[in-house]
């Protein structure tokens, strides 16, 4: 019996080798017809024995290429056309309903070619195929065809054209296919112009000599230096004006990190994944002892493995150019600092001209090429927490891959938070979170946000129905959202910051039932106009109720207190009736005496329920950090001091009143005279987890809601997350944790969009 049908496949199915995959299946199953890209994904016309057509349908999802994500396979029976054979047809147009995949690391097959001296792509710095390489950062529009990428200026040579046109070849319609003959080309330049000789060899020579080199990568430039050369690292810090914030390092492989950091499963799996994030690893001792200046005073190291052919070639050069791929498994001494080339906290440098202008005072040389980067995309950062990986930043390798929402709805564009900004566009039941934009503290990053808005809308061909934004009226993200809405005549929907945090976690888990939300972060404007940050919420549909909050602490000096933990410690002493100790305890602070007076009079001491400031107060009381040189430094040092030390909670360390206010002052009081900082830090984490679990348990009993969602940047703290989740699960509660989104502000836009969609649904 003959069957004929049209099949539509949606998801990430363009630019990942899906059409040649379908062609090979059809050849094997003796099915006739064609396959082509269209704006909605991939369309297939299939005709043949009914059993064979059914087998094709089943295998489309079960055996899809590694980089593909099949969201739906829909079959519609049709009249037989009596096709002869099976072909790959030209792409069709139409309204876009598909998406482009993220950039991924060089695949094993391409690596084998790259290091084969007999092959025509021996040490070719732009080797790629349908299974690997750039996607998002080279794509200008969909459908994904070469003419719509930054490879368009490089016509295929005859040999590449044959591969491109052969359905049996893994480069069939691989839009980034190229070779040394057709380009692109690599070059190293310094103050005097192009450096003669092999660019890779010359770059490695400079790095080994202690120089700083800007290296063009997938979504922008990195600044690189020898991580074992303390003088080079110090020079990079001075030039980049980055005094203490830790750098990430790149190693040839996980084996090269032995003796420096612990690389357990699944951290190694994330390091070696196609996404190639920076993974935060526990160091063996302080990083400074092995890599001076890379992560000052910390016992945590951000590490990554090569993702691009250029990066692999640097390590291949260091290994003396061995043939084959066996060297990839051998430990190598070479470690490179690999930090984003984003001077002054501005967006990562993207173009050659921009690199020459903005990096001239930082880099001694620039390793560039003539393949344009269409879209900026910074490195992703992942922190292991048990078997889960918590995103610190979701960008290259992951963005803009969509998240499936619990339900379809009107298209929403949400503008995210002021810090760690990212924007989100929804289409149907999918949410597309942009790559990391950054902190909207300078004009360049604000312009990048607008660039990201236009790019996401253009790439997705989305026409939003509503604009969602943070409740705070004065931050740039809200201003940008309101301006966009006014320009396009769209409705707006303001979403409270912590409501959005919890909604983001619910959205990624597909959770629509009522849920308790524990939102713990630095700050977000509350509905009452005050600074929130330690909130216990109940979410029902698109609405929330504030069930409780942390006892407010004063912020002496306002925003300065968020950068100077000694001020939060002083605030705690004042609340304990020990304010007279402030001047002597913090005698090195010129403002100590006046701060006491400020607290006494309640002048410039706005209240906050922020959990982030509680961490700061604890770090300040224990003397672990009095002034922060980068965000969350105090919390990082507090958590670090508590590592690997079991400690029972201080059961009298908190109190919950009838209004749901959690008072942690007894816990902080126990730290005020603690001389053992490690004991104090461990007690703090154990008691905090117990206190929060007690708080949530009471709310669950009172509300009847047995599911709790975590949200907010404080959940990047592994000690807190693991202990608290364990306690709540022991109470029989279901815990939803951020897994595919950052818990902090980097994932906020998804929560804003989901709240707005639910609000529109409720109003319909």
Image (cartoon, rainbow, N blue to C red):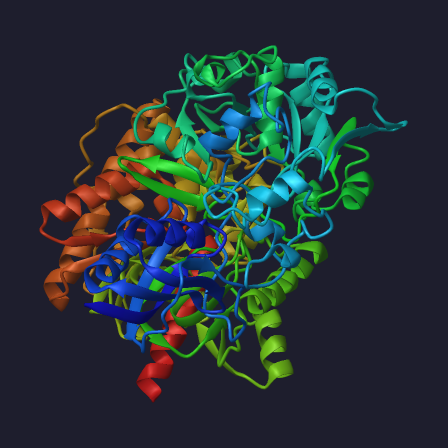
Instruction: Locate the N terminus by quadrant.
Output: bottom left
Percent coordinates x, y for residue 129 in the rendering: 52, 41
Residue at the image point whose x is 66% and y is 60% from the top: 446
**Which of these two is toward me, 225 or 580?**
225
The answer to whether residue 264 is left or right of residue 380 is left
**Which of these two is toward me, 120 or 359?**
120
Q: How many marks?
A: 0
In the rendered image of this protein, does residue 594 appear above or below residue 489?
above
Residue at the image point whose x is 64% and y is 81% from the top: 487
Percent coordinates x, y for residue 458 in the rendering: 59, 68
**Which of these two is toward me, 227 or 265?**
265
The answer to whether residue 645 is left or right of residue 111 is left
**Residue at the right extreme, as displayed:** 192
Instruction: Locate the C terminus by quadrant.
Output: bottom left
- Residue 484 falls in image quadrant: bottom right
In the rendered image of this protein, does residue 720 appear above or below residue 677?
below
Percent coordinates x, y for residue 223 in the rendering: 67, 32
**Residue at the bottom extreme, as displayed:** 764
Asked if residue 554 can be seen in this view, the reply is: no
Percent coordinates x, y for residue 639 in the rendering: 37, 32
The answer to whether residue 207 is left or right of residue 597 is right
Asked if residue 635 can be seen in this view, the reply is: yes
**Which of these two is toward me, 292 or 270?**
270
Residue at the image point whose x is 52% and y is 73% from the top: 462
- Residue 314 falls in image quadrant: top right
């Amino acid at each position: 019996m003959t069957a004929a049908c049209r099949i539509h496949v949606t998801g990430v199915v363009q630019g990942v080798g899906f059409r040649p995959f379908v062609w090979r299946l059809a050849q094997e199953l003796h099915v006739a017809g064609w396959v082509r890209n269209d704006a909605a994904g991939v369309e297939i016309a299939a005709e043949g024995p009914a059993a064979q057509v059914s087998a094709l349908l089943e295998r489309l999802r079960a055996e899809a290429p590694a980089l593909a994500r099949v969201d739906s396979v829909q079959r519609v029976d049709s009249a037989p056309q009596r096709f002869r054979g099976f072909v790959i047809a030209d792409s069709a147009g139409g309204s876009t309903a598909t998406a482009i995949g993220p950039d991924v690391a060089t695949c094993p097959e391409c690596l084998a070619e790259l290091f084969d001296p007999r092959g025509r792509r021996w040490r070719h710095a732009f080797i790629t195929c349908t299974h690997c390489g750039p996607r998002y950062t080279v794509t200008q529009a969909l459908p994904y065809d070469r003419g719509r990428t930054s490879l368009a200026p490089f016509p295929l040579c005859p040999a590449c054209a044959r591969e491109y046109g052969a359905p049996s070849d893994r480069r069939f319609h691989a839009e980034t296919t190229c070779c040394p003959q057709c380009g692109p080309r690599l070059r190293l330049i310094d103050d005097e112009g192009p450096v003669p000789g092999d660019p890779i060899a010359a770059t490695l020579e400079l790095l080994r000599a202690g120089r700083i080199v800007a290296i063009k990568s997938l979504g922008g430039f990195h600044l690189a230096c020898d991580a074992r050369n303390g003088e080079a690292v110090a020079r990079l810090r001075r030039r980049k004006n980055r005094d203490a914030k830790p750098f990430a390092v790149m190693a040839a492989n996980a084996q090269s990190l032995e003796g420096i950091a612990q690389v357990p499963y699944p951290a190694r799996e994330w390091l070696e994944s196609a996404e190639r994030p920076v993974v935060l690893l526990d160091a063996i001792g302080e990083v400074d002892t092995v890599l001076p200046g890379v992560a000052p005073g910390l016992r945590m190291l951000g590490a990554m493995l090569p993702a691009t052919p250029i990066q692999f070639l640097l390590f291949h050069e260091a290994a003396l150019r061995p043939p084959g791929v066996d060297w990839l498994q051998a430990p190598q001494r070479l470690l490179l600092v690999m930090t984003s080339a984003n001077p002054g906290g501005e967006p990562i440098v993207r173009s050659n001209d921009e690199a020459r202008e903005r990096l001239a005072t930082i880099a001694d040389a620039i390793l560039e090429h003539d393949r344009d980067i269409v879209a900026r995309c910074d490195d992703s950062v992942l922190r292991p927490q048990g078997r889960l990986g918590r995103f610190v930043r979701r960008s290259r390798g992951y963005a803009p891959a969509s998240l499936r929402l619990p339900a379809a709805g009107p298209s929403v564009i949400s503008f995210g938070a002021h810090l760690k900004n990212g924007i989100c566009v929804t289409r149907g039941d999918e949410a597309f979170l942009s790559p990391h934009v950054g902190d909207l503290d300078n004009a360049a990053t604000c312009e990048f946000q607008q660039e990201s808005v236009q790019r996401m809308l253009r790439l997705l061909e989305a026409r939003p129905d509503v604009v969602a934004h943070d409740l705070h009226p004065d931050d740039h993200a809200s201003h940008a959202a309101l301006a966009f809405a006014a320009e396009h005549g769209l409705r707006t929907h303001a979403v409270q910051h912590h409501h959005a945090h919890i909604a983001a976690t619910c959205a990624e888990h597909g959770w629509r039932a009522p849920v308790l939300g524990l939102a713990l972060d630095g700050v977000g404007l509350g509905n009452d106009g005050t600074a929130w940050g330690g909130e216990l919420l109940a979410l029902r549909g698109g609405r929330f109720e504030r069930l409780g909050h942390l006892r407010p602490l004063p912020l002496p000096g306002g925003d300065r207190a968020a950068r100077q933990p000694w001020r939060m410690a002083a605030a705690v002493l004042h609340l304990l009736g020990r304010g007279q100790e402030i001047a002597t305890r913090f005698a090195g602070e010129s403002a100590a005496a006046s701060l006491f007076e400020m607290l006494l009079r309640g002048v410039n001491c706005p209240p906050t329920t922020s959990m982030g400031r509680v961490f700061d107060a604890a770090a300040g009381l224990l003397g672990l950090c009095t002034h922060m040189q980068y965000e969350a430094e105090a919390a990082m040092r507090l958590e670090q001091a508590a590592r690997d030390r079991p400690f029972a909670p201080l059961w009298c360390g908190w109190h919950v009143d009838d209004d749901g206010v959690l008072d942690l002052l007894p816990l902080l009081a126990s730290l005020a005279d603690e001389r053992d900082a490690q004991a104090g830090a461990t007690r703090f984490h154990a008691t905090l987890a117990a206190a929060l679990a007690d708080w949530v348990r009471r709310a669950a009993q009172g509300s009847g809601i047995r599911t709790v969602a975590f949200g907010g940047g404080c959940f990047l703290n592994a000690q807190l997350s693991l202990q608290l989740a364990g306690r709540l699960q022991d109470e029989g509660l279901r815990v939803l944790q951020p897994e595919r989104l950052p818990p902090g502000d980097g994932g906020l836009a998804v929560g804003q969009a989901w709240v707005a969609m639910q609000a529109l649904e409720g109003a319909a």
